[in-house]
Image (cartoon, grey):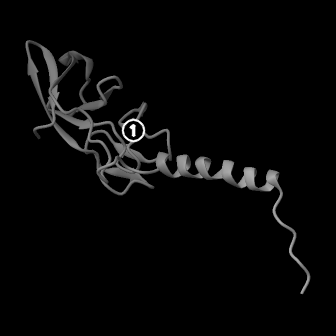
Amino acid sequence: MPARPSASRRTVLRGAAAVPVAGAALAACSPGDDGEASAGPTAPVELGPESEVAKGGAKLYEDEKVVVSRAEDGSLKAYSSICTHAGCPINKLEGTTLTCPCHGSEFDATTGKVVHAPATEPLFALSVKVEGGRMVASPDA
């Protein structure tokens, strides 16, 4: 049986360099360390004036990782804007559709429901109230 040539140093180094890249790609698609995607705010956050959200519309508060929508009857709903697929912060709102930049999941900002996969779970609901004309969202929904 002929002897197999040994791997060159270059071949070994190329293989070793590819491992961290693959690991980083998998980590970017994984939820947090506890196995669940981050739910967004962990304490009450002030968002802005109630008047910022029109009836039938929604507003994304990127820094606070919250989206607020207002029904035609004037009631407000709030959801975490952290994608339930891989935990990426959602940064795009068109009308009442939120789009995750990582894998293209889409959510309805008025219900929190998934409208386009890969996400399968709805956004995490938050409570929202108005204090002194300003909206405050909190995770105690």
Task: Say which residue label 1 marks.
Answer: 98
- Return the residue nearer the eye: 60 or 46: 46
The percent coordinates of residue 134 (x first, y second) are 15, 15
- Return the residue nearer the eye: 48 or 1: 1
Q: Residue at x 17, y 37 (%)?
A: 126
Q: Quadrant of residue 52?
A: top left
The percent coordinates of residue 20 (x first, y second) are 59, 48
Rate crowding at label 1 as few (under 14), some (14 to 19) or many (20 or more) other CA atoms within 10 Å.
many
- Return the residue nearer the eye: 52 or 79: 79
Disc 1, SS: strand
The percent coordinates of residue 11 (x first, y second) are 79, 55
Task: Determine whether, in the image, residue 76 is placed left or right of residue 64.
Answer: left
Task: Determine whether, in the image, residue 75 is placed left or right of residue 99.
Answer: left
The percent coordinates of residue 16 (x first, y second) are 67, 52
Q: Amino acid at mark 1?
A: Leu
As drawn, the residue found furthest toward the left would be 131
Q: Quadrant of the N terminus?
A: bottom right
